[in-house]
Image (tube, helix red, strand yellow):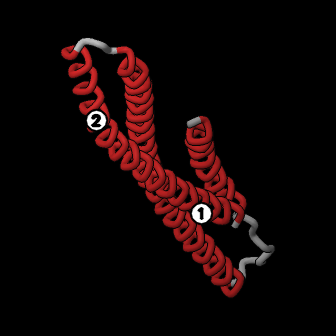
Amino acid sequence: MNTLNWRLTWFGGTVLAIGCTAAVLGQGRNTMPDTGGSLTALTEELRQLRLAVEESARSQVQTQALGVYLSVQQSRLLQVTTRLDAARRDLDTATARSRQIATALSSIEDALPGATERQERARLESQNRDLKEEQVRVSVQEQQARNRETELSQAMQLEDTRWSDLISRLEQVIKR
């Protein structure tokens, strides 16, 4: 999550930098050649001004589009992160329950040879069967949780790669 927070902070700073860069670029293209009042020079200056405005507009549109893409990607990252956290909690819960069952089964198996009363032995055997059935069920849940966690980890890597690609594209637009 620290990486995600850093990237979000970086994104905000980048958007601010883009705005400042656009303002500076807009002001920096005011160089006028010494035309001496010539109509040809004035026409050339207007062409250059038009090209500068078109380039600025094109750059602004690209920057805005990348901003939208980054916003959408940020939302995707947050969704996948939330789902991955939930899958990891589910996996931890299933693993803990599996350990509890294994400990209980071990206790029952240790107690079975010492059970001399018929009712006590039947109760222990019944608990043993029930726990073994639950162990199978929990084992399936644990495997499903592991699979889900693996899938979501891969999805997180994919979304992180997309995020990095968008950041790179934004940096390229800024450098122009």
State the image quarter where residue 174 is shown. bottom right
Marks counted in the figure total: 2
Please name the amino acid that badge 2 sits on. Answer: Glu
Work out which residue is located at the far left of the displayed protein and give it.
119
Q: Residue 59's x, y, as percent?
A: 57, 66
Q: Is residue 141 left or right of residue 103?
A: left
Contact flag, marks 2 and 1 (Cβ < 8 Å): no
Q: Nearer the viewer, mark 2 or mark 1?
A: 2
Q: Nearer the viewer, residue 91 or 100?
A: 100
Q: Quick check: can you spot residue 77?
A: yes
Tell whether 152 sits left or right of 133. Answer: right
Q: Where does the image place residue 162, in percent across and percent down from the top left?
A: 54, 61
Which numbered marker is on residue 112?
none
Question: Label 1, on which residue?
Answer: 165
- Compared to residue 140, the image places residue 85 above or below, namely above
Question: In the rendered image, which residue does mark 2 sit on?
Answer: 134
Whether residue 133 sits left or right of residue 15 in the image: it is left
Query: How many neighbours does mark 1 have within 10 angstroms: few (below 14), some (14-19), or many (20 or more)?
Result: few
What x and y, as percent, mark residue 163?
A: 55, 56
Kindly report the distance in space between the C-alpha atoms of the residues bearing marks 2 and 1: 46 Å
**Is the C terminus in the top left, top right, bottom left or bottom right quadrant?**
bottom right
| Relative height, residue 29 to residue 127 (above, below) | below
Q: Residue at x 38, y 36 (%)?
A: 90
Residue drawn where x is 45% and y is 38% of the image = 88
Query: The residue under label 1 is which amino acid type?
Result: Asp
The kind of secondary structure element at disc 2 is helix
In the picture provided, is 40 more to the left or to the right than 15? right
- Within the image, what quadrant is residue 91 found in? top left
